[in-house]
Image (cartoon, rainbow, N blue to C red):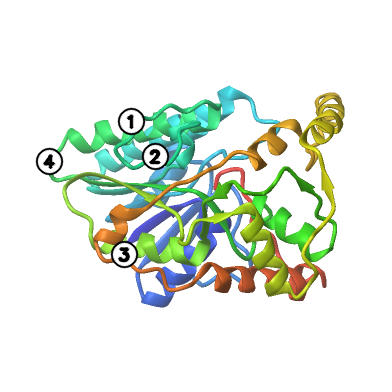
Amino acid sequence: MILVTGDSGFIGRHLLAQLVHRGVGVRGIDIVPKADSSPDYPQVVGNILDRDAVMRAIGGVECIVHLAAEHRDFGILRKKYFEVNEDGTRQLLHCASELQIKKFTFFSSVAVYGAQQTPEEDSAVQPTHAYGQSKLAGERAATVWARADPARQLVIIRPTVVFGPFSRANIFRLISYVCDRKFVWVGNGEHIKSIAYVENLVQATLFLLDHMRPGVEIFNYSDEPQMTTRQLVSLIAQTARVPEPKLKIPVGVALQVARAFDIIGTLTHMDFSITTARIKKFNTPTIYKSERIRLLGFRPPYSIREGLDRNIRWYFEELKTGKAVEFESSQE
């Protein structure tokens, strides 16, 4: 039996579907009830900070896959990140210790590397944002737990930006702007942006669950080939059969406009797509290799083009027709 925390979230929903398809006994815990269209499995609706809820969910399981997290990049206090991502993880680990559970998979993030270029799993961790700092705190708590008992098995997965059906995050915004012909270039688009298709990440997770062993192992996850923003936008346009965007705005002008949105957002607590942080991030390379899992023999089943095709079809066929269900949780 496997417990998945954050099972109503974006990655959690995809992972649960595959576990159920495999015939694996599963249980979920999330602050958001699972959707009616989800597979048939038991779920505890509760907070990972609530010990009673965790103990109801964790009884009888042999392995925990911990996805639940505070992850949004707007309107979240530093304290909240650590409350969920560190304290919530510690709660799970304490309960796992009580019930003699030896296997734990922790979903972290490449955000723990901070602004480094092309970090590998053994690179120094230097997170610059509260989210990455809180995920690193969760990693360290899990590592202390694992090393306290030589029989315990811990896998830490650090994915890059994940995209796919049911997500409304960064790559979704890019897809929607290109498909709706609203995309405007800011910068030259020559920076590499590592991305990961959700079904590939799920298969990588299943692969690592099958290969767990005593001790602590850390794996980055991103898909190949590594693409520049320009190549990615071109591929989205080709896949969606829309013209490639041509309109350009100088970075300096865009930042001036974005500063106005920053001020309005601070005053109104609204999350605008145009912010100085997002423009700077768009024009910064993010290159994350995942050779370690590939050396173990993992091969992702889908190409980036196939993943984009599935994402774009979901966007047009379901979201734009009003039939799609969003799976977003404050603990995902």
- Amino acid type at circle 1 is Arg
Give the residue at mark 3: 207
Closer to us: mark 1 or mark 2? 2
Q: Is residue 274 left or right of residue 41?
A: right
Q: Residues within 10 Å of mark 3 (few under 14, many from 20)?
A: some
- Amino acid type at circle 2 is Pro
- Amino acid type at circle 3 is Phe
Residue 116, picture quadrant: top left
> Can the viewer see residue 41 in this picture?
no
Residue 254, picture quadrant: top right
> Can the viewer see residue 58 in this picture?
yes
Q: Is residue 90 left or right of residue 249?
A: left
The residue drawn where x is 69% and y is 54% is: 168
Earlier-in-chain disc, 1 versus 3: 1
The residue drawn where x is 54% and y is 62% is: 13
Residue 243 vs residue 96, the one in the foreground: 243
As measured in the structure, the alpha-carbon distance from the residue carrying label 4 to the one carrying label 1 is 17 Å
**259 is higher (above) or lower (below) than 117:** above
Residue 319: percent from left, percent from top: 76, 67
Closer to us: mark 2 or mark 3? 2
Give the residue at mark 1: 140
Give the residue at mark 2: 119
As measured in the structure, the alpha-carbon distance from the residue carrying label 1 to the one carrying label 2 is 18 Å
